[in-house]
Amino acid sequence: MEKGNGCCFSSMASSATITCVLVGITLIMCRVLYVMYWSSRPLHTRAPQPVSTLIVLGSGGHTAEMLNLLSVLPKDRFTPRIYIAAATDNMSLQKARLFENSLADEVDIAVPDFLISLYA
């Protein structure tokens, strides 16, 4: 067999394979750097505005779960808070009133009367 016969094709194939691998690695590295850059930046550049929040209270432990959830949320971000409960569920509204009063005691402000009772 003579040297050089059929050798040209395998040389071109290996060169194309190496080029594809290098282009793939370059694209992956660009994507990784892009994601790292954008993930380190804050999502919002301006201060968030307050959001009206509707809290639906219920029986069977639902009221306690909602009040526990509200206790960990930023109070100034989720305001005003509007509570809804069934007309027959007086206990939930009392707990919501106590919760709002405890928040008002922390910052020494009067609690507005915005507890709403929904008739079923």
Image (spheres, rainbow, N blue to C red):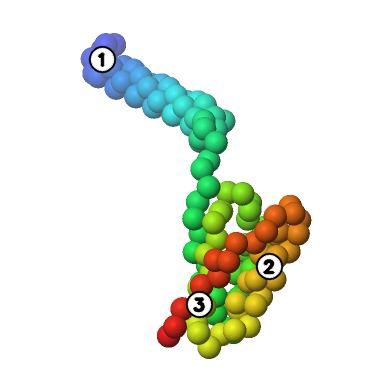
Looking at the image, the residue that sits furthest to the bottom is: 88
* Mark 3: amino acid: Ser
Q: Do the residues labelled 2 and 1 touch (CB within 8 Å)?
A: no
Which residue is located at x 44 percent, y 29 percent?
31
In-front residue for pair 94/41: 94
Where residue 89 appears, as percent x and y from the top left, is 56, 85
What is the crowding at mark 2: few (fewer than 14 residues within 10 Å), some, or many (at least 20)? some
For mark 3, what is the residue?
Answer: 117
Taking the spot 63% from the left edge, 71% from the top edge, the residue there is 96
Which residue is labeled 1 in the image? 8
Residue found 40% across the figure and 25% down from its top: 27
Residue at figure coordinates x 31%, y 20% from the top left: 16
Does residue 9 appear left or right of residue 26 in this picture? left
Q: Which mark is residue 41?
A: none
Of the pair 81 and 30, the residue shown nearer to us? 81
- SS for tag 3? strand
User: Which quadrant holds residue 92?
Assistant: bottom right
Image x and y of residue 79, in percent: 56, 54
Q: Name the residue under label 2.
A: 99
Q: In which quarter of the image is the C terminus?
A: bottom left
